[in-house]
Image (cartoon, rainbow, N blue to C red):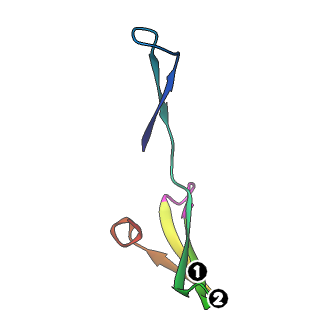
Amino acid sequence: MCVQTRTGEGPGNVTINHHKAFLKSIVVQNGSTTGGHYYSYVYDEKAKKWFEYNDSSVTEISEEKVM
């Protein structure tokens, strides 16, 4: 993911800085505002794989399903 930040004020005084950000985890909530179920996706940098953590279950999952 590429993130841009802008600094400076007024026309002609703008500097755009580019930063790289790497997504490492996602928390998902299924349900409503009064109740539901939470689970998460976590990227393991050493294994270069995504995992789904759902209650007591940990399962390898494809990047396509995460995104």
Q: Main secondary structure of the magenta part?
A: loop
Q: Which residues are magenta?
A: 43-48
Most extreme residue toward the right is: 56
41 shown above or below 20: below
Residue type at tag 1? Tyr
Which quadrant of the figure has residue 55? bottom right
Could you say which is closer to the camera, residue 41 or residue 60?
41
Q: Residue at x 46, y 13 (%)?
A: 10
| In-image side of 21 versus 63 (left or right) | right
Numbered circle sitting on residue 53: none
Mark 2 neighbour density, 10 Å: few (under 14) some (14–19) many (20 or more): few
Could you say which is closer to the camera, residue 60 or residue 33?
33
Q: CA distance from mark 2 to mark 1?
A: 7 Å
Mark 1 neighbour density, 10 Å: few (under 14) some (14–19) many (20 or more): some
The residue that disc 2 covers is: 55
Q: Quadrant of the N terminus?
A: top left
46 shown above or below 30: above
Q: Position of residue 3 (x, y in %)?
A: 46, 37
Q: Secondary structure at mark 1?
A: strand
Q: Residue at x 48, y 76 (%)?
A: 60
Q: Position of residue 37 (x, y in %)?
A: 59, 88
| Total count of labels | 2
The residue that disc 1 covers is: 39
Q: Residue at x 58, y 80 (%)?
A: 39
Q: Secondary structure at mark 2?
A: loop
Could you say which is closer to the camera, residue 33 or residue 43?
33
Residue type at tag 2? Asp
Q: Position of residue 12 (x, y in %)?
A: 40, 8
Asked whether the beta carbons under mark 2 and mark 1 sit within 8 Å of each other, the answer is yes
Q: Position of residue 9 (x, y in %)?
A: 51, 16
Could you say which is closer to the camera, residue 44 or residue 25?
25
